[in-house]
Amino acid sequence: MKLQRNGRSKALAIGAMALVSSLSLAACGSDDNNTNAAPAGGSGSAAAPAAINCGPKPTALVAAGSTAQGNAIDILKNNFEAACKGATVNYGGGGSGAGVQQFNQGKIQFAGSDSALKPAEVEASKAVCTGGQGVNLPLVAGLISIVYNVEGVDNLVLDAPTIAKIFDSQIIKWNDPAIAALNPGAKLPDADIQAFHRTDDSGTTENLTKYFAKTSGGAWAYPASKAWAGKGGQGANGSAGVAAQVKQVKNSISYAELSYAQTNNLKSAAINTGAAKPVEATAANAANTFAKAQIAGANSSDLALTLDYATKEEGSYPLVLVTYEIACDKGNKADTLDTLKAFLAYTASDAGQKAIGDAGYVPLPKTLTDKVNTVIGALA
C-alpha cells in the first residue's frame, strides 16, 4: 500500500517557477573574442545554449571540489568546449573540502564548494591570489534530497528531528513510531534502516547538518561540519557513491543533490516543515527558498549567502544548497584568466542556468546572477 499525502498544488509549482528569472549572458574579453553558437551538450541538456563568449584565446582550465554540482559541470563544460575551440575544463570532483584545499595550494583555477570559505580559508587563499583573495561566487543551486529505497513506500514524509535521529542511529527501524506518525496508514516494514553518509569532506554534509542544527530541536548533537559526525550508518564517497548505494541496498536512506536522485531513479522524501502540507523535493519548491536568500559576504566581491533552513512557508523546500565557484578576485593566472571568466560567465548566463535547470538543478534569481556577473567581470 502506498503512503497517502495531500494533493500537490499545481498553482504553487507554477508560481515557484515564475521566481526563476531569465539571466543575462555576461561577455568577457575583447571585442574580437572567439564567439560561437554551441550545440546541445552534456547529459540532461535539452536545448542548445545561445552564443557563448569564449574569450580571445580559449585554453585549459583545471578545477575540483563539490560532487553535488558534478552533473551540472559535465553539462556546462560539454557545451563550453563545443563552442570554444581549444578550451577544456577538467573538473576533478573529490568533495568541497578537497577542492578548497587544492585551490589554496595553487593547483587549480577554481574550486567548487557547497559551503562558503571560512575566514581561515580566505586568509590562506591570499598566498596564491597575489594582491587579492578567494571569493565565493554562487553559481549552481540545488536541493538536498533525502533519498530512500523501501519497497511499497512511494510517498514518504519525514521531518527534521526524525531525519536527524535516523542518521544518528537513534531511530533504527522503518516502522518506528516517529516515522509511522508522519505517515498514517502506511505499510512501513519491520526492517532495519540502512543509512548511508558521505565519507569525504562534503559541503552537502555541512548543509545537511546546518539544517539539523536549525530545525532538529537538539536531536542532532554535533556541530555543523563537512566531516560526518553521526553514529553508526555506512559510508560512501561522493554524491554518486551514496546514491549508488541507496539504489542497490533495500531499506536504505541517504542524502544527495536532486540531480543524483533523478539520474538514479530514486525516490525522495517530502519534508514536514510545519507548513500546512509536506513540501516535496522539487526545483520549484527550492526556488521559493532561494528567492529569499540574503547575501552575507564580507565585501562586494564576496557573495556568500544566508539560507533559511527553518522556513515554514508553504511550498518552500528547506534543505537547499548552493555551490560556490571559488576564484581569486585578484591574482589569477594571466594565461587562464580570460577562459576562466568566460566559463564562469556562461555558467551564470540564461543559457547555462537553463541547461543545468533541465537536469534537476535550480536556476538562480536574476537579482543574484546580476551581482555574480559584476564580480566575474572584475576578476583580475
Image (spheres, rainbow, N blue to C red):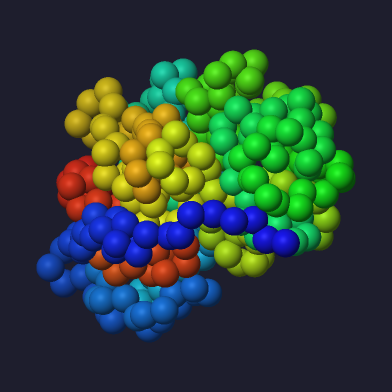
Residue that protrudes farthest toward the left in the picture:
31
Q: Is residue 195 left or right of residue 263?
A: right
Judge left or right: residue 64 versus residue 195.
Answer: left
Of residues 285 and 181, the one drawn nearer to the viewer in this rendering:
181
In the rendered image, which quarter contains the C terminus?
Answer: top left
Residue 308 visible in the displayed image: yes
Query: In percent of the image, x 39 and y 52: which residue is there?
Result: 285
For the view shown, which residue lies furthest in the front direction?
185
Measured as percent of width and height from the top left, residue 302 is found at: 28, 32
91 relative to 77 in the view: left or right: right
Q: Is residue 74 above or below residue 219?
A: below
Query: Taking 87 as reference, is 30 left or right?
Result: left
Q: Is residue 377 visible?
A: no
In which quadrant will I find the N terminus? bottom right
Name of the residue lying farthest toward the right: 191
The location of residue 265, given as percent across then percent down, is: 64, 67
Whole-percent x, y for residue 23 in the image: 21, 60
Residue at position x 72%, y 46% in the image: 253
Query: Where on the picture, by quarter, is residue 118?
Result: top left
Splitting the image into 4 quarters, where does residue 246 fall? bottom right
Residue that appears at 35% across and 44% down: 314
Of the pair 54 and 245, the residue shown nearer to us: 245
Q: Position of residue 273 (x, y in %)?
A: 46, 36
Point 33% across, 34% down: residue: 305
Q: Which is nearer the eye, 257 or 38? A: 257
Residue 157 sits above or below residue 10 on the image:
above
